[in-house]
Amino acid sequence: MTNEDLQQIQALVTGTHKVLVLTHKNPSVDTMASALSLSLALGKLGKDVTVAMESQPLVEVANLVGIDQVKTTLSGKNLLLTYKPYTLGDFEKVSYLEDPGQQGNLADSFKLTITPRDGFAPDPANFTFSSTGTAADLIFTVDVLEPSLLGTLYDPAMFSATPIINIDNHDPNKDYGRFNLVEPEAASISEIVTFFLRAVNAQLDADIAGNLYQGIEAATSHFQSPKVAAATFEAAAICLRAGAKGKPQVQPQPQAQPQPVQPAQPQKSARDNSIPADWTQPKAYRGTSTV
């Protein structure tokens, strides 16, 4: 990310109000931690943030801060009326009428009139209502190789009209964003997000830092991944200084070696005078063998 890119991103983030943070269904701990940390940090900057994915959160991400705010649908600003099945020409005209209310010029109802062609009688059961055109000033995608992987959350019209910051560490990413923070060499997406938030002067609190640290640990198998580099430890240090609580890896304890059992020593007792004396003396045995 060049200084020019950073300045443009800072201006973009500063000038936005409504932000979407989107990821794919069933994300990993690293991916979900990154998305939630972005959401929390942008919220602290005064943004109206929605974080969403197509599926319900998995148990493995349940302890991340903010997981209860994740949505699986996006409410749109436009009401969409759909008729299906439809043949071109079934409807000839669409018009609307605002009826004046009892106060004269103020309308108290809205009527939409759909005029069918002669001989065609539309079935009311074939009309459905839905929403579209989700209002957003900025979209962050996290661990999304291409927008179609968002499933039902992907709105082509919204993506074509809204600036996108694409964050990922997988190759090949389609680089579909206005800004593509795609670093395949990074050990985790949480590592990328840590540096990004610091670059845009977003404040990391203990919750944000804790999420990111969990993401880094999970993606690197407690810093054992071959992709771990100096930047990974630097990102982890940033999180720890911001209040993240690192969970030390439990080392297996060596098992105690069993101690040899010492044979019980015979108790000395007074000699029974009734036993012949030579019975208590050492005996010499000789073994012989024949082939």
Image (tube, rainbow, N blue to C red):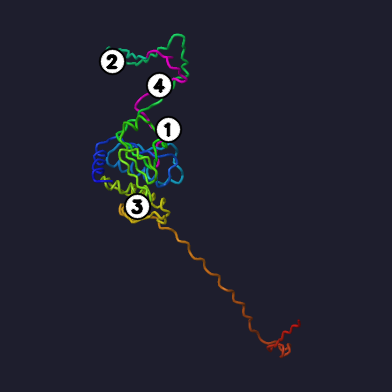
Query: In 3D space, how far apart are the residues under numbered discs 1 and 2 (Cα atoms)?
Result: 38 Å
The reply to whether discs 3 and 1 touch (Cβ–Cβ < 8 Å) is no
Q: Quadrant of residue 277?
A: bottom right
Q: Earlier in the sequence, mark 3 or mark 1?
A: 1
Residue segment shown in magenta: 67-93
The reply to whether discs 3 and 4 touch (Cβ–Cβ < 8 Å) is no
- Where disc 4 sits, the SS reads strand
Residue 9 shown left or right of residue 280 in the figure: left
Query: In 3D space, how far apart are the residues under numbered discs 1 and 4 (Cα atoms)?
Result: 18 Å
Query: In 3D space, how far apart are the residues under numbered discs 3 and 4 (Cα atoms)?
Result: 48 Å
Q: Earlier in the sequence, mark 3 or mark 4?
A: 4
Residue at image coords 39%, 38%: 146
- Where disc 2 sits, the SS reads loop
Q: Earlier in the sequence, mark 1 or mark 2?
A: 2
- Where disc 1 sits, the SS reads helix
Which amino acid type is shown beneath numbered disc 3? Ala
Residue with the mark numbered 1: 152
Residue with the mark numbered 3: 244
Query: In 3D space, how far apart are the residues under numbered discs 4 and 2 (Cα atoms)?
Result: 25 Å
The reply to whether discs 3 and 2 touch (Cβ–Cβ < 8 Å) is no
Which amino acid type is shown beneath numbered disc 4? Leu
Residue with the mark numbered 4: 81
Q: Which mark is residue 106?
A: 2
In this view, the residue farthest toward the bottom is 277
Q: Position of residue 258 (x, y in %)?
A: 55, 70
The front one of 287 and 211 is 287
Q: Earlier in the sequence, mark 1 or mark 4?
A: 4
Which is closer to the viewer, label 1 or label 2?
1
Residue at image coords 52%, 68%: 256
Which amino acid type is shown beneath numbered disc 1? Thr
Q: Earlier in the sequence, mark 4 or mark 2?
A: 4
The reply to whether discs 1 and 2 touch (Cβ–Cβ < 8 Å) is no
